[in-house]
Image: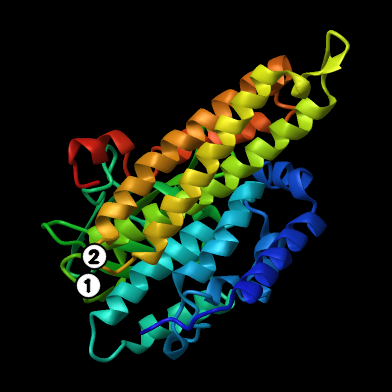
Amino acid sequence: MSAEVISADDLAALRDSVVDLIARGGGSTAVRAAIAAPQRTDGQLWAGLTEIGAAALAVPEELGGAGAGWGSLSAVVEEVGAALAPVPLLSSAVMATGALMMAANNSSTVPAELGDLVEALASGERTATLCLAGETSWDTPGVSADGGLLTGTAHYVTDAEAATDLVVLAGPGPHATVHVIAADSPGVEVVPVATMDPTRPLSRVRFTEAAAEAFPAPADLLPRLRDLVWALLAVEQVGAAAAALRLTVEYTKTRKQFGRVIGSFQALKHRMADMYADVETARSIAYAAVDAIDTPAGAELAAAAHVHCSEAFSHIVAEAVQLHGGIGITWEHDIQLYFKRAHGSAQFFGQPVDVVAGTPL
């Protein structure tokens, strides 16, 4: 399932479309309204993104998608990350769809039910999320499967409140099995949880002998999925880090101290130059990781991207808050949302410290 090459001009046009869509949807005002809504999701923006084909970009044509690959989807992920838009792009178009595509590649003939769901996710007709993590780790599924019935609790489930379907990676055993179940099925309970980062809603999903469709999965599903998520998450972090830098530069152009705008002070210029260097090095390794997906170098680059981009994003927002001064820690200013996103995403799908220590997830 090779991806079609999209030209640089087409990618630029795609980025412009996403940026325009976010701006017309209300930008920061819409983000704040969405995180206070019942499902904590901007449904209108998600509908617009699926209408322009964002969810279909990485899906092969034989499964109802555009066949443009993960690199093309990255352009959308970066701009959505820059806006902190609370839409199920990472959860549905990357995590859930990625797991289903890996299961599809494991079969000589794609099961009709699996193919139909991937196509529905690509079109935006349905939305899914991934249920995997146990209470303390992403490398041990929190849900077990026995005779087609799911029991247990998946933690840190993203966008579950807005999902129509759940893609469950279940144990026991060293290899996870893939299961699909409607979010409103009997035996399924979605429990929203409070989060430090309000722009990425998380839930616990409890399964009590819930009957789910099972599909064959490759033995290396978990590490391959981890590499995919880390690579695309790194791109999202780059988008948010670049946006935090832009906010900081604009603020220092208007804030005055001692009769001068603070952006004219050489010490602050140097700090912002360092922030820019962090953004660009993070961008380089993030896109290198995306390009290496499903190659021998993929695992190493994905881990490096997760570590470097998490650290770079955290450093950038720490500097941004300091350069904003007191207003940077108030709810009224958006920079605090980027600070929270940085620290939340650094722990997503496994902590960087675990990567350095050699822990699988």
> Colour mode?
rainbow
x and y percentages locating residue 170 in the rendered image: 24, 59
User: Of tags 2 and 1, which is closer to the observer?
Assistant: 2
Residue of label 2: 221
- Cβ–Cβ under 8 Å for marks 2 and 1: yes
Please name the residue shown 69% across and 47% down the image: 34
x and y percentages locating residue 248 in the rendered image: 70, 31
Q: Is residue 332 left or right of residue 55?
A: right
Q: Is residue 160 left or right of residue 224?
A: right
- Residue 180 versus residue 105 in the image, above or below: above
Q: Is residue 65 left or right of residue 347?
A: right
Secondary-structure class at tag 1: loop
Q: Amino acid at mark 1?
A: Ala
Q: Label 1 crowding class (10 Å Cα cut-off): few <14, some 14-19, many 20+?
A: many
Mark 2 and mark 1: Cα distance apart in space: 7 Å
Rendered image: mark on residue 254 = none
Residue of label 1: 217
